[in-house]
Image (cartoon, rainbow, N blue to C red):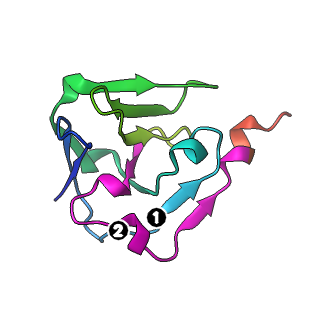
Amino acid sequence: MKKLTCHCGGVEIEVSLPNGLKNPIRCNCSFCKRHSSVMAIIGSDDLKVVKGKELLKLYQFHTKTAKHYFCSVCGIYTYHKPRTNPNMHAINVACLENVNPFNLKDILDKDGANHPLDKKK
């Protein structure tokens, strides 16, 4: 288990990374490009809020499918449920204890600006 915290420490989350930090991503959608986070996708059972659940606030936009969670005290984005798979979690890698996102190699760029769910038929 790895510990994930917001900046003020009010929110603490345990995440399971049985295979380590695999395939970190960065998204260019209108929202992600503004918070510029490196994210990692984990399973729905691999995230447990252990402290500060009452501090987490939900932000949704556009299709209101994705659920983005932030600490209401310090404003840090901690994780979200992506709209491509709401049964998974995308965590903010920078919030992981002892992980420096600037040292990561091979970050995948995800084209969220041209999301397939936004394509008109």
**Would you say 54 lies left or right of 89 here?**
left
**Would you say 7 lies left or right of 1 here?**
right
Name the residue beneath numbered marker 2.
21
Picture residue at 40% right of the left edge, 25% below the top: 58
Query: Which region of the structure is painted magenta?
Result: 87-113
Image location (x, y in percent) of residue 9: 17, 41
Picture residue at 64% right of the left edge, 25% below the top: 62
Image location (x, y in percent) of residue 33: 60, 47
SS at mark 1? loop
- Please indicate, yes or no, whether residue 87 appears anywhere in the rendered image: no
Tell me, yes or no, whether the highlighted magenta stretch contains residue 13. Answer: no
**Would you say 103 lies left or right of 95 here?**
right
Picture residue at 30% right of the left edge, 70% below the top: 20
* Residue type, mark 1 in image: Pro
SS at mark 2? loop
Name the residue beneath numbered marker 1.
24
Tell me, yes or no, whether the highlighted magenta stretch contains residue 93. Answer: yes
Of all residues, the one furthest to the bottom in this rendering is 105
- Callout 1: 10 Å neighbours few (<14), some, many (20+)? many
Image location (x, y in percent) of residue 108: 57, 66
Q: Which mark is residue 38?
A: none
Picture residue at 26% right of the left edge, 42% below the top: 6
Residue 51 sits in quarter: top left
Residues at marks 1 and 2, CA–CA distance in whole angstroms: 7 Å
Q: Quick one: quadrant of the C terminus? A: top right
* Residue type, mark 2 in image: Leu
